[in-house]
Image (cartoon, rainbow, N blue to C red):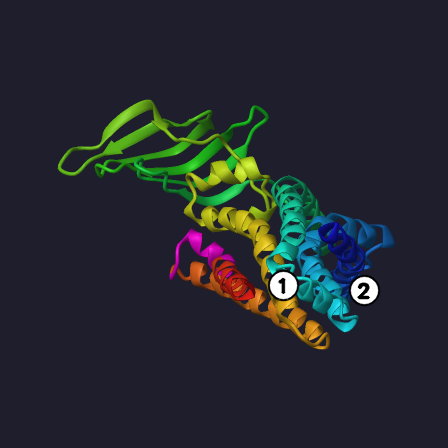
Amino acid sequence: MLQRYLLREILTPYLLGTLLFIGLVTTDLLSSLSGVFLSKGTSWLQIGELVLYRMPYTLGVALPLGLVFAILVALARWIRDSELKAVLAAGISPIHLLKPILALAVAVAALAWVNAGWIKPEAQARYDDLIYEIYYGHVPSGVLTNAAYAPRGLGVYYARRIYPDDEGGGRLEGVRVVTPDGVVWSANEGYWKDASWVLKDAWRTAAGARPEYWDTVPLPFPSRFVEKKTSYESLPMPELVELARVDPAARFPLERRHADAVGVIALAWLAGVIGLSLRESAWAFAAVVLLIFAYYVLWTLAAQLSRYAVIGPYGAWLADIIFFAAALAGTRRLR
């Protein structure tokens, strides 16, 4: 009964908090692009489409932050009206009150994961194309330029150009492949079909041996062709998983998608622990700001450390690990 009551108390400010953050993120988007809109003569229809295509990204920000806001606002009201004090005086453990918070957080995390994996990428691809069209007047092609891959155990694969075809494959130009045993394959052209790079009029060069000519040679490549998007963010989850197998740079964005969804639970858990530990409702707003700021700093730091190879792709979980550790330590103190 008490848990359902707390859940109802959270849901109303959650709706308001989510709308608040949607408004803030959308306002930031429009203000940052206002100069472009004016200089390019962007129509109101295109502006509306941009906001619509950006909405899954906006929800990815608003859903977790709105939950932090709602939890602390609801618990602040309980503190102000002495309801929390009455609950504790009745001998009810504060940990009992964390259960509805965590249940709601798991539901929001699942929604955020689906949004980040399947809804947001499609919208992001359309957003990127529309931005490109606004800037340059046309939509970019799907040609990959200077594409390099390092599939595990197969060496290094490089192509100067990869052109997509209508059969789910690609045409290769300027190909170089270096196998783990040091053999170099080179060809001016070839094609990417199923799980192979097929080189035409290829030359095989090995240490201490004369170059050998091959009419065609299939080289194993554990991935199908993925047409170029403007960013990893515009790749649906299955395609990003597949690309991460052969493109090391795609592994951090993949881990980040999972970490961001699980981060909803870490944020909500720590917000609940802090809210149940407060004795003055005035501290609730400061707690909202500090929680969001700390998570953003760690989230950004992880991206920078990964960019400069200080940490690997699993560094995407840095903020989650720290917040889960803090939430666990705080929960033990609540007992």
Query: Does residue 117 appear left or right of residue 49 in this picture?
Result: left
Please provide percent x and percent y for residue 67.
69, 57
Up the image or down, 330 lies above or below 176; here it is below
Element type at mark 1? helix
**Residue 151 in which image quadrant:** top left
Q: Residues within 10 Å of mark 2 (few under 14, many from 20)?
A: few
Nearer the observer, 118 or 128: 118
* Residue pointed to by mark 2: 38
Tally of numbered tags: 2
Task: Please say whether residue 311 is one of the residues in the magenta stretch.
Answer: yes
- In the image, is 132 to the left or to the right of 182? right
Residue 271's tag is 1
Q: Which secondary structure, mark 2?
A: helix
Give coordinates of residue 62: x percent, y percent.
Answer: 71, 57
Residue 202: percent from left, percent from top:
32, 29
- x 41%, y 47%: residue: 248
For disc 1, the neighbor class at 10 Å (few under 14, some 14 to 19, many from 20) is: many
Amino acid type assigned to the residue bearing label 2 in the image:
Leu
* Rendering quarter of residue 123: top right
Q: Amino acid at mark 1?
A: Ala
Camera sees residue 227: no
Between disc 2 and disc 1, the foreground one is 1
Q: Which residues are magenta?
A: 310-320
Q: Split into 4 quadrants, where in the image is the C terminus? A: bottom right
In-front residue for pair 278/146: 278
Q: Are marks 2 and 1 in contact (CB under 8 Å)?
A: no
In terms of depth relative to the viewer, which is nearer, 187 or 74? 74
Does 65 sit left or right of 169 as displayed?
Answer: right
Main secondary structure of the magenta stretch: helix
